[in-house]
Amino acid sequence: RATAGQILISPDGSIPLTEFGSSSGGYTAPLEENSGFKAVEDLGDAYEKNPQKLWTKEIRRSDIEGMFPEIGELKGIRVTLRNGLGAWGGRTRQLVFLGTKADATLDIANWRGDQFRKKFSLKSDWYQFPQFPDYSDPGFWLAKSNGGVLAVGTAKHFGDAKKVKRAGDIVDIAGIPTAGGYWLVSSAGEVFSYGDAQHHGDLAAVSLAAPIVAITPHPDGRGYWLASGDGGVFTFGSASYYGSMGEVALNKPVVGMEVTRSGKGYWLVASDGGIFSFGDAQFYGSTGGIQLNMPITSMAAAPDGKGYWFVASDGGVFAFGSVGFFGSRGGDTNRRPTSGMAVSNTGEGYWLVWDDGVSFPFGDTPDFRSSVAKKTVVAIEVVP
């Protein structure tokens, strides 16, 4: 402060320049990397309370794939060259991005030239990368309104309804317990079966008071329920009827349905977050009395049936019962509305998906590249 506003002038009239150098790996940048001074050890770097000493940042797999589209699906990142000064061998000077189609090499001349650091706003160029979730991890299916189905991760594609004559758009998808097939349902109540999924009937010949919005499989895989926007419930195969809201005037339409672990009860959720429980399904709470920023679009039940989640179109997640809250897109800048959510088989995480297919993992769920769906995604279903 004592020299604020003052300039030091050398005897020859020149102005001496100073440079501040810092690091997060033990050494400042060397002369050959366009630094104005010789590299020196940063003795203050190891200060235990220094928040810049060790830092982490999560980067979505699909964002890196977008930076290097030629690699296909990203399998891992390797640091193949460092400058030899400081911890871990020094600053990163070359990265290799391993993909299913090709590998991409990124040469990094210096701090200023590090495109990876700039792209993801990283604090330094001392990189270490964790082992990536393998694509043998569980996956999911995405259903599109035109009948298309995208299989992600270990999910297998058993067919779709893109070329099938339908009376309505596809609105939901449900997988069978063996992961060997799935059903699609249209807004007109038509059910289409693929793989080992058996057709147990539908509402194709029935005049509906409101469009169908959801299909939910029985835990034994030998039946399913359909739910309509007015709260109606329709049963097929081994699925039993435990009640509905079809004769009740609802504040907002029903948008989703989930079944209990026993198959002896189910929940309906409305777009205002109102919950309706039937059979052995327990009520754990709702957002029916809360003013939401955006409407609820989907729900998911905990694997043990002791709770459930809702997701709103802005990515906000609401957790009830024994389930954990693992994060959301609520309050973030969202390019597209969230059309659905799916819970991992452990119940310790979930995916949110935009209507263009971009998925967001939370908790223990792997980060899968699903944006190739591009548009009109209406539902997500996890592989059992």
Image (spheres, rainbow, N blue to C red):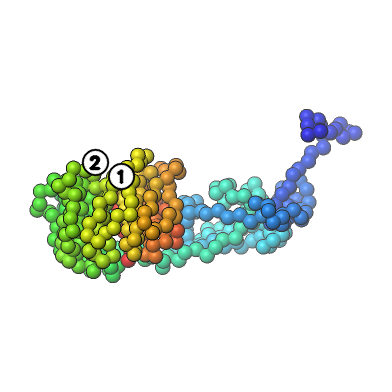
Q: Give the answer, above or below, for where 57 lies relative to 10.
A: below
Q: Residue furthest top?
A: 5
Chain-order first, disc 1 or disc 2? 2
Position of the N terminus by quadrant: top right
User: Which residue is at 53% across, 59% downward?
Assistant: 97
- Where disc 1 sits, the SS reads loop
User: Which residue is at 55% across, 49% downward?
Assistant: 120
Q: Position of residue 363 (x, y in %)?
A: 45, 58
Say if residue 340 shows up in the picture: no
Position of the C terminus by quadrant: bottom left
Q: Which mark is residue 258?
A: none
Q: In this view of the protein, which residue sits in the foreground, 32 or 299?
A: 299
Q: Position of residue 246 (x, y in %)?
A: 16, 49
Q: Position of residue 13 (x, y in %)?
A: 86, 31
Q: Amino acid at mark 2?
A: Asn
Q: In this view of the protein, which residue sits in the foreground, 204 or 342?
A: 342
Q: Which mark is residue 288?
A: 1
- Residue where numbered disc 2 is placed: 251
Say if residue 16 shows up in the picture: yes
- Where disc 2 sits, the SS reads loop
Q: Is residue 161 left or right of residue 294?
A: left
Check whether the beta carbons of the residues at disc 1 and disc 2 lie within 8 A of each other. Answer: yes
Q: Amino acid at mark 1?
A: Gly
Q: Residue furthest right?
A: 11
Q: Position of residue 229 (x, y in %)?
A: 21, 47
Q: Is residue 137 left or right of residue 54?
A: left
User: Which residue is at 82% across, 37% downward?
Assistant: 16
Q: Give the answer, above or below, for where 203 lies relative to 271.
A: below
Q: Quote the CA–CA distance across marks 1 and 2.
A: 9 Å
